[in-house]
Image (tube, helix red, strand yellow):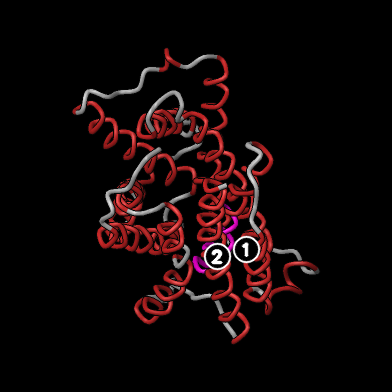
């Protein structure tokens, strides 16, 4: 079992860096969608990740070898590829219809779905506090969207479509994460990610409009570069944080990501009319806090449940 270094301050700092990067990413992507389609953005992001991570692994002489994968391993790799590619693309497609703040709130379902998937696939168990955390999170989402509930359920339109697409993106991410968890028995996470990114470059090549990069303005180019390297840096910080601090505590810190996105939207809105914050009332703010609190409770309660099980 992996043991952390115990440098919790470093782990906390790296977790906060990850949260900051993930919170600003949807804002950058939302602006970029005004100049480039989702397929092309995703292709360039996968290309940058493949080149940078591939160079890093090549320097370490640790490139992946698919020969170690058996039939079961190939099946898991296929699920992981489709899951992460689907997550990247669907998140962008949904983001085109809703605000970054709303997208970040809805995507909080992804780790919840992963935990539920662990119940089904691996026979894991929820503690009572985890079930309470799930209930708090779902109730928080309902409160966050309280001013849009009629629109979501009785007047299906572009906003409702965006929410549904983000929910599907969350399911796709959970499928990827469950498959990767099993793939870790065969190869390192960096190599799994490199294979997924490389597959994405090949698969998204056909629908992507590569020439559109020549038509975007300087801001668009900067946003594309930022979005392309953001995920690698964020995941690198995330991986390092896990090396120094318990996963449950890192996850609890990352739960603040949607609230940070809402803060970014409010901060940047006066600078650009293209950044429209999610309209919030008092119930929405309470709901957002409950989403964060429920996510934190599920993470920390899961840690306590594992301790109790190890004692028993």
Q: Earlier in the sequence, mark 1 or mark 2?
A: 1
Q: Give the numbered dot on residue 67.
A: none
Q: Give the numbered dot on residue 129.
A: 1
Picture coordinates of residue 28 (x, y %)?
A: 39, 61
The quarter holding residue 280 reads bottom right
- Locate residue 244 relative to residue 66 in the image: left or right: left
Task: Give the residue furthest to the front.
Answer: 312
- Locate residue 134 relative to residue 178 in the image: left or right: right
The quarter holding residue 64 reads top left
Q: Residue at x 53, y 50 (%)?
A: 306
Task: Give the residue furthest to the bottom.
Answer: 282
- Locate residue 7 relative to residue 189 in the image: left or right: left
- Locate residue 198 relative to residue 159 in the image: left or right: left
| Label 1: few (<14), some (14–19) or many (≥20) C-alpha neighbours in 10 Å | some
> How far is mark 1 from mark 2, CA to CA?
7 Å
Picture coordinates of residue 263 (x, y %)?
A: 42, 76
Picture coordinates of residue 69 (x, y %)?
A: 47, 17
Q: Residue at x 41, y 30 (%)?
A: 192
Range drawn in magenta:
99-110
Decide whether residue 180 is among the magenta residues: no
SS state under label 2: helix
Q: Which residue is tagged 2?
A: 297
Vertical comparison of 278 with 78: above or below: below
Q: Residue at x 48, y 28 (%)?
A: 183
């Amino acid at each position: 079992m992996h043991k952390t270094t115990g440098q919790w301050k470093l782990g906390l700092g790296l977790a906060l860096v990850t949260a900051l990067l993930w919170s600003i990413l949807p804002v950058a992507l939302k602006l970029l969608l005004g100049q480039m389609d989702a397929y092309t953005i995703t292709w360039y992001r996968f290309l940058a990740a493949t080149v940078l991570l591939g160079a890093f692994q090549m320097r370490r002489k640790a490139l992946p070898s698919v020969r170690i994968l058996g039939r079961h391993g190939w099946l898991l790799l296929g699920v992981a590829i489709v899951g992460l590619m689907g997550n990247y693309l669907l998140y962008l497609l949904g983001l085109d219809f809703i605000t970054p703040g709303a997208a970040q709130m809805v995507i909080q379902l992804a780790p919840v779905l992963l935990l539920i998937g662990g119940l089904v696939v691996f026979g894991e168990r929820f503690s009572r506090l985890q079930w309470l955390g799930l209930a708090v999170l779902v109730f928080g989402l309902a409160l966050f969207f309280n001013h849009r509930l009629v629109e979501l359920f009785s007047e299906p339109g572009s906003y409702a479509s965006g929410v549904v697409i983000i929910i599907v993106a969350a399911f796709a991410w959970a499928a990827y994460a469950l498959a990767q968890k099993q793939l870790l028995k065969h190869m390192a996470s960096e190599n799994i990610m490199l294979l997924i990114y490389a597959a994405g470059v090949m698969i998204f090549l056909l629908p992507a409009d590569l020439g559109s990069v020549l038509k975007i303005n300087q801001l668009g180019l900067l946003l594309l570069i930022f979005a392309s390297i953001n995920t690698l840096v964020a995941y690198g910080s995330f991986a390092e944080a896990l090396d120094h601090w318990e996963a449950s505590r890192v996850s609890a810190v990352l739960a603040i990501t949607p609230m940070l996105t809402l803060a970014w939207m409010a901060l940047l809105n006066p600078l650009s009319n293209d950044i429209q914050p999610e309209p919030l009332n008092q119930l929405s703010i309470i709901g957002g806090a409950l989403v964060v609190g429920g996510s934190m409770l599920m993470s920390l309660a899961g840690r306590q449940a594992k301790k109790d099980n190890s004692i028993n």
